[in-house]
Image: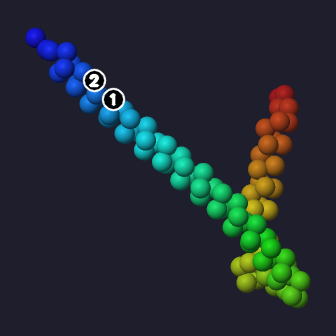
Amino acid sequence: MDTIESTQQQARELLNSRIASVTDLVKARQLVTELEAKLVEAKKEDKKAYVRATKDGWSADELKKLGLDQGATVRRKTAAKKTTDNQSAPASEA
């Protein structure tokens, strides 16, 4: 027959395992939040650098030829808007 102490110990071990997994989840979420914030800041810096380059005389076409078009953020927003618009448009009947 199990003693109260051994049952409590088994329960603690189970809880510790569950606590460890939720701790890992919290750490992963914190890292995602941190990296998303860094990405937002990097995109702002990218936009500022692009504007500086155009003010320094580089044309949009020249930058594009160098592989430095206006940036992925503009394309993603446009693509996301098109997707949203298509989803919200009523379906045509056949």
Q: Residue furthest left?
A: 1
| Residue 74 in the image, given as x and y percentages of width and height | 79, 62
How are the residues colored? rainbow
Position of 63 compared to 16: left or right?
Answer: right
Image-quadrant location for residue 75? bottom right
Residue at image point 54% right, 49% down: 30
Q: Is residue 82 above or below residue 62?
A: above
Q: Residue at x 49, y 43 (%)?
A: 26
**Going 71% across and 79% down the picture, which residue do you hit?**
67
* Amino acid type for the residue under numbered disc 1: Leu
Q: Few, some or many C-alpha atoms within 10 Å of disc 1 (few <14, some 14-19, many ≥20)?
A: few
Query: Where is residue 25 shown, x and y percent of the image?
Result: 46, 42
**Element at badge 1?**
helix
Residue bearing the label numbered 1: 15
Instruction: Find out whether the residues at labels 1 and 2 contact each other: C-beta distance under 8 Å.
Output: yes
Rendering coords of residue 18 (x, y %): 36, 32
**Whether residue 65 is situated above or below residue 28 in the rendered picture:** below
- In the picture, the quarter occupied by the C terminus is top right
| Residue toward you, 19 or 46 | 19
Point out which mark residue 11 bears: 2
Quadrant of residue 22 within the rendered picture = top left
Name above or below for residue 55 compared with residue 82: below
Tell me the SS state at disc 2. Answer: helix
Labelled disc at residue 69 = none
Q: Is residue 72 visible to us here?
A: no
Dot 2 surroundings within 10 Å: few (below 14), some, or many (20 or more)? few
One can see residue 81 in this view: yes
- Mark pair 1, 2: CA separation: 6 Å
